[in-house]
């Protein structure tokens, strides 16, 4: 660690206590930028990184609502408006009991770099709530979304801040949030992305993060003249990102063999084929059931319950060539990283945000495997959100093929931007440094152009 990074991290920890995920995200970026800051004293004197670390605005609010039993419930809502140097704040909303200020700040910070990589004019933000939609009725979820938006609506707008979905916020929640925004603001605008197709949504948006993660893996493999065809893949999660990662893997000839939720995971040696995946989508998106039911439905597959006390996750110990972590942050610890490497995995494409702990990242980089960090590999979701904003502004919809072509090109461009930045700054083949540097440079130059704001 350079002196500059060490003193920066000391300040970040002192100023933002009890936010370990935020420290982790900042540390990784600061480490990657050492050579850039060395070569560009103007970024240091303008305190660019110090300014990026400090959110432009943090909004925190009470969200009161009444459950189906008539009991008053209170949750906490947040929106972190992190950086608007290159466009309106953009980033998802997460509804999960683990949500707190530190987790959203880490996500907003990552989002700034990711959005810069997409080549689109998107600033960075993130928001959400400690509300748990799991086990709630549709009416409870609707009342919750309406109460949440009743405060949030005054802070967002199609040219100010454009939220989208994330964990716990899918098409159903975006619908309720959009309905309440429209009612309060009295205007129909592209203020949220991930909308339904009948009311301003983009084709391919639901698929985009998972498809993009598959395309990114394809690009990384192509750099070694290989393809995904015939590769065995470990996928975690069974939500939006995991489902469409599996779909793209199947289209590209690969064989996904695992999926999970917070209760456990299934392993299907024969592969999760298109028919089984359609069943999972119905299970998760309509019936809102648990992944354990997969093993009851499909013989030959095995369900393993999560063991919170264990020092590793057995999902990552199966033999495979590729891994697609697509559930949540820090789901691959150092033991998991070792198990992955020992069992043949040499491609990791992160659908989730920061799913690998810092030591795990170091192990992947040291082993020189094809490791695509989340801010590059999962940028397809926000990229198609950006395309949804463009279509809303044009009041026009592109075809599925057109959007998919844009997505493929963007993932290709992100891949080559990572490689060329890594090459230029002396760390060839390192996608972590490459993504952080390429994302940073565009923001830094824009901030210099705009003065001290
Ligand atoms: P969903 O809510 O659709 O699915 C999340 C999945 O991860 C579920 O299977 C969930 O299981 C599991 N999960 C969530 N939290 C935990 C946990 N603490 N431990 C174990 N499993 C967990 O979310 P998404 O698929 O949208 O998001 C998944 C990841 O991808 C997140 O890291 C998100 O930030 C990232 N991402 C999402 C994008 C998008 O477009 N949606 C864009 C870019 C990144 P359970 O149902 O049991 O909670």
Image (cartoon, rainbow, N blue to C red):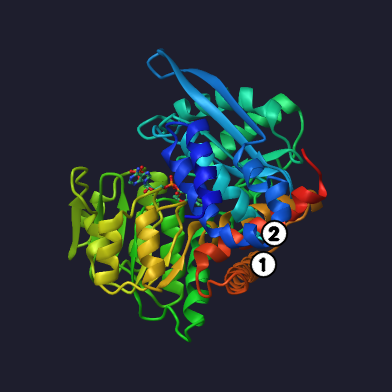
Q: Earlier in the sequence, mark 2 or mark 1?
A: 2
Please report the residue visible at 70 percent of the width from the left and 55 percent of the height from the top.
41
**Label 2: few (<14), some or many (≥20) within 10 Å?**
few
- Name the quadrant of the C terminus: top right
Rendered location of residue 186, percent (x, y): 76, 28
Q: Looking at the picture, how far across and down is residue 340, in whole percent?
A: 29, 66
**Could you classify mark 1 by the number of other residues whose Cα lies within 10 Å: few (under 14), some (14-19), or many (20 or more)?**
some
Image point 41% across, 64% down: which residue?
246
Label 2, secondary structure: give it: loop
Which residue matches tag 2?
40
| Vertical side of 6 occupied by 417: above or below | below
Q: Is residue 167 visible?
A: no
Residue 171, horizontal then vertical, whole percent? 53, 44
Residue 42 visible in rendering: yes
**Mark 1, residue position:** 406
Give the total number of marks visible in the rendering: 2
Could you say which is closer to the camera, residue 115 or residue 174? 115
Please give left or right for residue 411 compared with residue 287 in the image.
Answer: right
Q: Helix, strand, or loop for circle 1? A: helix
Q: Nearer the viewer, mark 2 or mark 1?
A: 2
Q: Position of residue 198 (x, y in %)?
A: 65, 47
Q: Residue at x 41, y 67 (%)?
A: 365
From mark 2 to mark 1, how far is it between C-alphas?
33 Å
Q: Work out whether residue 190 or residue 339 is closer to the camera in this orientation and state it.
A: 339
Query: Is 40 located above or below residue 53 in the figure?
Result: below
Quadrant of the rendered structure where residue 418 is? bottom right
Which residue is outermost to the bottom? 225
């Amino acid at each position: 660690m350079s002196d500059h990074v060490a003193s920066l991290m000391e300040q970040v920890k002192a100023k933002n206590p009890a936010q370990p995920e935020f420290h982790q995200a900042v540390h990784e970026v600061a480490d990657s930028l050492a050579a850039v800051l060395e070569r560009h004293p103007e970024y240091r004197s303008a305190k660019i990184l110090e300014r990026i670390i400090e959110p432009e605005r943090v909004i925190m609010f009470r969200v009161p609502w009444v459950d189906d039993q008539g009991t008053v419930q209170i949750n906490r809502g947040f929106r972190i408006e992190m950086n608007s140097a290159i466009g309106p704040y953009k980033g998802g909303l997460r509804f999960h009991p683990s949500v707190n200020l530190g987790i959203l700040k880490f996500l907003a910070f990552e989002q700034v770099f990711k959005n810069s990589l997409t080549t689109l004019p998107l600033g960075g933000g993130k928001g959400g709530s400690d509300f748990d939609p799991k086990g709630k009725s549709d009416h409870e979820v609707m009342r919750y979304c309406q109460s949440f938006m009743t405060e949030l609506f005054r802070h967002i707008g199609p040219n100010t801040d454009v939220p989208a979905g994330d964990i716990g916020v899918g098409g159903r929640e975006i619908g309720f949030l959009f309905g309440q925004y429209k009612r309060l603001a009295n205007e129909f605008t592209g203020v949220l992305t991930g909308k339904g197709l009948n009311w301003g949504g983009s084709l391919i948006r639901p698929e985009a993060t998972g498809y993009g993660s598959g395309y990114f893996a394809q690009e990384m493999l192509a750099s070694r003249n290989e393809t995904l065809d015939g590769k065995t893949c470990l996928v975690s999660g069974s939500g939006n990102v995991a489902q469409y990662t599996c779909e793209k893997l199947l289209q590209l000839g690969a064989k996904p063999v695992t999926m999970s939720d917070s209760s456990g995971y299934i392993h299907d040696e024969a592969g999760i084929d298109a028919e089984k995946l359609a069943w999972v989508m119905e299970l998760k998106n309509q019936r809102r059931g648990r992944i354990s039911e997969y093993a009851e439905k499909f013989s030959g597959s095995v369900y393993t319950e999560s063991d919170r006390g264990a020092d590793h996750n057995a999902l990552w110990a199966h033999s495979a060539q590729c891994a697609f972590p697509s559930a949540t942050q820090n789901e691959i610890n150092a033991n998991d990283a070792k198990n992955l490497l020992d069992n043949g995995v040499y491609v990791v494409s992160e659908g989730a945000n920061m799913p690998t702990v810092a030591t795990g990242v170091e192990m992947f980089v040291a082993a020189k495997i094809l490791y695509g960090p989340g801010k590059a590999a999962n940028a397809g979701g926000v990229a198609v959100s950006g395309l949804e904003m463009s279509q809303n502004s044009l009041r026009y919809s592109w075809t599925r093929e057109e959007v998919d072509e844009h997505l493929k090109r963007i993932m290709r461009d992100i891949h080559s931007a990572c490689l060329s930045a890594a090459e230029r700054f002396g760390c060839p083949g390192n996608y972590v440094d490459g993504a952080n540097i390429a994302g940073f440079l565009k923001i830094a130059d824009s901030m210099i152009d705009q003065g001290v704001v």
